[in-house]
Image: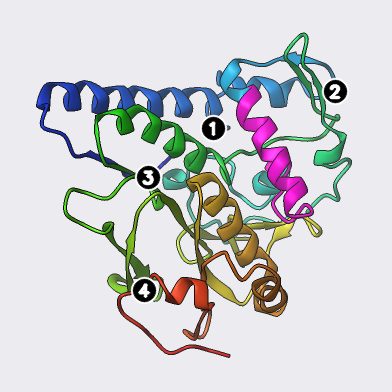
Amino acid sequence: MNCQMTAQVCTDDAGEARTALLAVDRWMQRVERELSRFRPDSDLSRLNAAAGRPYRAGALLWQVTQAALVHAAATDGVFDPTIGRALVEAGYDRSFELITDRRDAPRSAFSLPVATWRDIHFDSERRSITLPEGVQLDLGGIAKGWAADRALDILQPLGPALVDAGGDLVIGDPPPGEDGWPLAVADPLSPENDLVFLTLANAGLATSGTDHRRWRLGGRQHHHLIDPARRQPARTDILAASVIAATATQADVLALTLTVMGSGATDAWMTTHPHIPALLVLNDGRTLQNPAFARHAGAYFPIYA
């Protein structure tokens, strides 16, 4: 998953803590092994290679793919797991640390979708998934948050716990004597500095943006957040979006969705979803937060209205 991960648990039993933390490590290794589109032997890669015919999925791929389609429906397709081919065409065809700027490469010719997430077929009896021909899944927009939520389930029986999967956080009960876990959201324009401080318990927090995974291909700058309607990197004025939700999975999906939508559409979204805390950082450095997010913040910043 190409990121640093941290898991913490508060307990008096160091032996049990060590066992549980090692179990979390094995769990994340399994998610990487089965769901990476950069591993040709992963369950996800084999599913993509089988597009056009039924593929009997492993339990993990089956669960995450179904979860991805639930969130695709909830966001009316702004979150779309069928953008794997578009990512490859944009140059994101290998693990990010291996991508280099290719200035002499021809400009990408993006393909229109041959089908959508609505055309994926599930057979529950055989636990098989049938992708339409030409469709490739990418689960990068949901897998880290989903894996973090399951990792918290491993730790919580021991006591208050937190899992940070490369910026997708899931937070359990607060540490003893505290109201919550102290957290910070980094400033995307100055990552070594914090933009806002939060205190959270029993929630998910995720940040998604175009500030980190960028590269140049054929003279154009690309990033990894795809606009499903155009099948190209999104033209958005949002540099980063942070969302607090019930789970890391939901926060992960919504942060990605808001970034892809851009501020023009998110104004209406924040009005119709006032209970979901959201913070946006625009490309010019201005910020927008709704009242639900401000209630969690311990330090404030200019609000763009």
Q: Which residue is disc 2 drawn over?
A: 52
Q: Which mark identifies residue 38?
A: 1
> What residue does disc 3 label?
3
Residue 235: tell me if it is visible: no
Q: What element carries label 1?
A: loop
**Where in the figure is residue 46, as x and y percent of width and height?**
65, 19
Q: Compared with residue 262, is residue 120 higher up or lower down, i.e. above or below? A: above
The amino acid sitting under disc 2 is Gly
Identify the amino acid type marked 3: Cys
Which of the image's four quarters has the C terminus?
bottom right
Identity, as a three-letter code, of the amino acid under mark 4? Ala
Q: Residues within 10 Å of mark 3 (few under 14, many from 20)?
A: few
Query: Residue 127 is drawn in which quadrant?
Result: top right
CB-based contact (under 8 Å), mark 1 and mark 3: no
Marks 2 and 4: CB-CB under 8 Å?
Answer: no
Q: Is residue 247 above or below residue 214?
A: above
112, 274: nearer the viewer: 274
For the residues bearing labels 4 and 3, Cβ distance under 8 angstroms: no
Look at the image and give the residue range highlighted in magenta: 62-84
Towards the viewer: 180 or 196: 180
